[in-house]
Image (tube, rainbow, N blue to C red):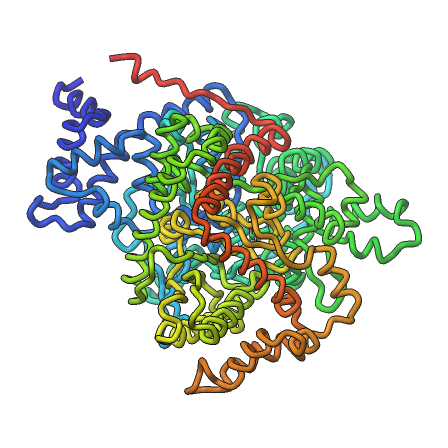
Amino acid sequence: MDARYKSREIERRSLDVDGLKRSFLEWLVYSVGKDARAATRRDWFHTVALAVRDRLVDRWMDTTRTYYQQDAKRVYYLSLEFLIGRLLTNSLANLGITDQCRQALDRIGLNLDDVVEAEPDAALGNGGLGRLAACFLDSMATEALPGYGYGIRYEFGLFEQRFEHGWQVEYPEQWLQFGNPWEFPRPEVLYPVQFYGRVEEFRDSVGERAYRWVDAERVLAMAYDTPVVGYGGDTINTLRLWSARATRDFNFGHFNDGAYMKAVEQKVLTENLSRVLYPNDATEGGKELRLKQEYFFTSASLQDILRRYLQHHSNFDSLPDKAAIQLNDTHPAIGIAELMRLLVDQHGVTWDKAWDITRATFSYTNHTLLPEALEAWPVRMMERVLPRHMQIIYEINAKFLNRSKARAAGDNGRLSRLSLIDERGDRRVRMGNLAFLGSHKVNGVSALHTELMKQTVFADFHAEFPERINNKTNGITPRRWLHQANQPLAALITSRIGNGWIKDLSQIKALAEKADDLVFREEFRRAKRKNKKRLAAYIARQTGVDVQVDSLFDVQVKRMHEYKRQLLNILQAIALYNEMRDNPTVSWVPVTKIFAGKAAPSYHMAKLIIKLINDVAKVVNHDPSVHDNLKIVLLPNYNVTAAEIIMPAADLSEQISTAGMEASGTGNMKLALNGALTIGTLDGANVEIREHVGDDNIFIFGLTAEEVNDLRASGGFNPRDVIASNPSLKRALDMISTGVFSPDDPHRYHPILQALTDGGDHFLVTADFSDYCQAQQAAMDLYRDQEEWTRKAILNTANMGWFSSDRTIMEYATEIWDVHPVKPEHPAETET
Ligand code: OX2
């Protein structure tokens, strides 16, 4: 090998300060093309990212090669969303070179923290579902599981949220505008994906009836790979995202006609397929483009999975032994029909065998019971867009209903509920039923949610397949959400129990015995205070509001949704404001209410609640009579990067959804792990958080899921009675309705008041109000006793070990996927 090349090769791997510094200077000039004097912060970010990337490529290839050589069983996590956030800090920490990198930059006169700030936040998802997928990628790589993520490389991620006169306004999020140093385009990895056309029946070589999909439109899916670095940098897995490309021969006819512009237009239209993420969280859009996105990435992923499998195998018998495909909600559920099509139509596998293989390969995670989120595609749309899949779905359904008929004897309601087709009104394909039927395992995301799945949406399927539903309570990665986001606390923990917790969060339990140690408490408080100062500075920058660092930071950060009940929180804030004004001589615990979250652009009620919070904040924050004892802020543009600043600084974590409606929650876990006390309903994973942290260390209030169910079923709930009997609630609502917070438009909040009264208060805000206020009072009272508060906060951190996504992912691996850790072989490092 050429000596110069060889030396550069070694340089690329060097992890010491000098080596890093030399690579930075070389990358800046030769790849970014800038002189150090002219380089911007963004140039430096690209430089550092590219140099860091160099240091993981060898191990990435080793990992992939090892999987290939061992023909290891892989798991494929199919998800329409991956809410990744920034990667630089994460890659440095997982490679273990943060300090070296900091020093190397120091020697060039740069600060790592500034460089990090130039990275855009990759927001290829809406909320919990997408962030869970990102945490799972981190955990799979850390646990050395052969796991691949498959999704869409959206050119525009989740919109940027700004407030204009207190209203949410959406702006496009152009995260790729300046290039993405983490991704590797793979122009040679291309798969055709078809839409529309028709199905032709013919006889195959042995005279059997067969089908082919003809006259279809064709799009190409091109791969972009991003390395996923596990903690310690040993395993580096792959996230493969698909981007739409027009075929080369797109509309050749137009060229011959001379209609060049028309042809180019067509190309642009085709490539719109991967242009933008749908900004709905837990609600279904129902638009044709969305169906096409779902099929596009699912088909490309399955073709890729089969190609990889066929490198080692000549028939499909052992596909389930080599591939586990996880459907992250129903978004990729069309994959069940697609795998059938690929096996039967393209590879000549018999129907029954193909069905056995399909079911043994797929499993499905349900993330919500909200009816408006259960995907159901109009049959007419499916017939047009995916005609062959519609036939396959009919066939699966006919065979299944036929089999179930005997058992459902006389119960037609049951058969129609089991059907893949909803025959009421315009006929629709129930994607949840398809996902259930085509999977060997179906899981919910918290114990309560899984139980409710059995009792509600999937009650009939559960009776039919009692072994299929299982629970996998969500988790979060401790690397990003504690080690990286909360360095003061992470350092404190490591100083006492060593750093084993980063990879094995169950070890954090050892902190519990420090809860009674006064010195430790003091240090724990100091770490929290540091984080609160950082957040206060961020709040001042983002909103212009000055908050007291020593006030109780009461945090509700999540998507804006009626069932999450930001409205309950702001009503309590108004009631507290009134109390403070009525009793100016009382020494109040100063409270800072911190909200953040985006509303779906078409969700008017959620947007109105945003405006209400901003309006109330304006009045309260400027009222001298509360003496700064209450501040309210709504931070704009909540995303992963903002969450990393907010989570570590919270004292109180608001998890106040109407019981039975939040499948799990994961923000609840991030906050508790960072030492916030939860105020919450017995909903989703809050139930299990209570079990782990202990009843004394959490504020539980409100109706239970069962009580909610009974109350709604009884039909006897009258919110007007509740309001009339609660003066502080009545006063808060009167203030809203008389325009105290909206003097420019006193009727602005009529729809909210309407929903809470004549509308029947579906989310039971009024029903839980009084209990919630009491729990808030208990929290404020406790906060006066800083020693006691800190003790409980420590116990929260210490008892959250079970909520690591490493635990969750290992449960999936052993109980659903049957996938095992594979240690990569690193020949390049033993050679020299
Ligand atoms: C969310 C759920 O709303 C949330 O409760 C859960 O923690 C998260 O998924 C991860 O499981 N879209 N987002 C969700 O469900 C759907 C559908």
Q: Percent from the top left, x then y, of residue 319?
A: 60, 29
Residue 315 visible, this angle: no
At x 33%, y 39%, the residue is 487
- Residue 785 position within the rendered picture, expressed as x and y whole percent measured from the top left: 46, 50
**694 vs 627, nearest the viewer:** 627
Q: Residue furthest top?
A: 831
x%, y% of residue 495?
35, 29
Residue 453 position in % (x across, y down) = 70, 49
Looking at the figure, which quarter contains the N terminus? Answer: top left
664 over 255 or under it: above or below: above
Which of the 4 image quadrants contains residue 369?
bottom right
Q: Is residue 195 left or right of residue 416?
A: left
Q: Furthest residue to the right? A: 410
Q: Is residue 651 left or right of residue 723?
A: left
The quadrant where residue 359 appears: top right
The answer to whether one can see residue 751 in this image is: yes
Q: Quadrant of the C terminus?
A: top left
Name the residue nearer the viewer: 10 or 2.
10
